[in-house]
Structures are given as structure tokens and as C-alpha cells.
Amino acid sequence: GAVVSQHPSWVICKSGTSVKIECRSLDFQATTMFWYRQFPKQSLMLMATSNEGSKATYEQGVEKDKFLINHASLTLSTLTVTSAHPEDSSFYICSATPALAADTDTQYFGPGTRLTVL
Amino acid sequence: QKEVEQNSGPLSVPEGAIASLNCTYSDRGSQSFFWYRQYSGKSPELIMFIYSNGDKEDGRFTAQLNKASQYVSLLIRDSQPSDSATYLCAGAAGPGTYKYIFGTGTRLKVLA
């Protein structure tokens, strides 16, 4: 149980284009989903917290107009990197917390999406 | 500022030994703590969580929590080369919140 998927697993795009990454909880409904970014040899950096049906809460320094988050249902959240540039190249990872479970504050991570912007 | 601190390592242990990973946290309001394993190029996978003072065992893994001293540890018994990875410690940012504060991770190397 508690499986989270991400799609695509990797993407290469040209500078200036937009990229959408999907995060799905496959066997549970997620109260909250989180989006992280990780650069090589660095720890996870939380970008935003996403709750179904409401606006995402962005961490300080993360541009909400550049990283658009939509949380349309209890099993799906999307992150769109708009007008991507090479410095946006990174490993993007989502996580989700189960809505109904004994471990309601446990985050289960998706496999990540590696974005390369040329 | 709320922080979770870990020694970055690498921590090298011989195969079959006990690996001891430590983590300290600054926020006394943190109630829940989590250990994740992350292989290079992969996303974190949950090893175990702990809420109460004392020890919690799951197979070869034992998590220990001491709220008075504000530290959390993870022991890995009978370490295997496949345990070589970065281990991330995380604390919930406060009661009733799902947001984590992550440590920077400890890189573990198990030598065959």
C-alpha cells in the first residue's frame, strides 16, 4: 500500500517551454501533497504544500507564477514549470500523506521526475 | 529557526556490523520523526517512523527517540552492502502539521 507515482520519470525540454509533472496516489486518498526539488548531492528542498481544492502554499523564495501547482482531486496533483530555463534542471519529487490511516502524517514519496532544460 | 542536523558522513562500516546514524533537532514541538533511505538518483523510501520515547524495532532496523535530549537515531544491524545509501532524518514541523523539516542526510557505506 501507499504507492505514489509520478509521470513522466524524465523529461528533456527546450528553454522557454513549459513542462507538466503529474503526481498520483495510487491506492489511497491524499490529504496533502508536497513538491520537492533536489539538486545533485544536496538534500530535498520543499517547494510547496498542496491541499485538494485550495491554493498551494509556497516556500519562501519559490516563485508561484513559475511553478504552478494544481491539486484537482484527492489523488492527483500537478506541477507545471513555466518558461523553463537551464537552471530549473533538477530532480522533482512529490510526496503524499494518507487521508485516513494511523500514520496520517507520514509522507510517501513518488519516484521523482528528472527535468533537463536545454 | 527549526533545524534537523545530521552528520553528512560518509560513515563506513564493515559488512555484518551495526551502523549507527544520529540526528538532533531543535524544535521541542516536533512530535513525529521519520527515517528515509535514498539511493543515488532515486527518491526517498520510508524506513520507519517513531512518535514515542524509547526504541522501535522493525527487522534489522531500530529507531530510538529521546525527546528530553532532542535526538533520534537509527541502528542498522547486520549491515549489508545494499544498505549503502543516504539516510535522511525528518521531523514533523509541529503538532498537527504534515510538513517535514529534513536533515541533510548521512551517507552510509557498507564495505564488503
Image (cartoon, coloured by chain):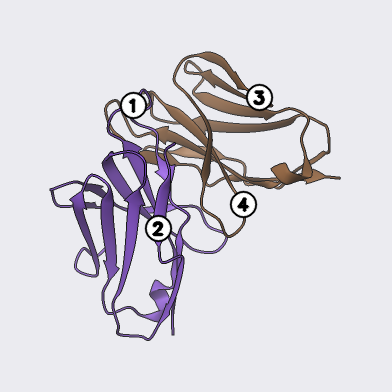
Chain colours: A purple, B brown
Q: Residue tagged by mark 3?
A: B59
Crowd class of label 1 (few under 14; some 14 to 19; many from 20; radius 10 Å): few
Give the residue type at disc 4: Tyr
Q: Position of residue B90 (x, y in %)?
A: 46, 37
Q: Mark 4–mark 3 contact, CB under 8 Å?
A: no
Q: Position of residue A1 (x, y in %)?
A: 44, 36
The residue located at (61%, 52%) in the rendering is B39
* Disc nearest the viewer among 4 and 2: 2
Q: Is residue A95 left or right of residue A64?
A: right
**Does B16 sit above or below residue B83?**
above
The chain ID associated with circle 4 is B
Q: B52 or B22, which lies in front?
A: B52
**Which label was assigned to residue B39?**
4
Local secondary structure at mark 1: loop
Crowd class of label 4 (few under 14; some 14 to 19; many from 20; radius 10 Å): some
**Which label was assigned to residue B10?**
none
Say which quadrant the N terminus of chain B sits in: top left
Residues at marks 4 and 2, CA–CA distance in whole angstroms: 17 Å
**Which label was assigned to residue A101?**
1
Q: Position of residue A85 (x, y in %)?
A: 36, 80
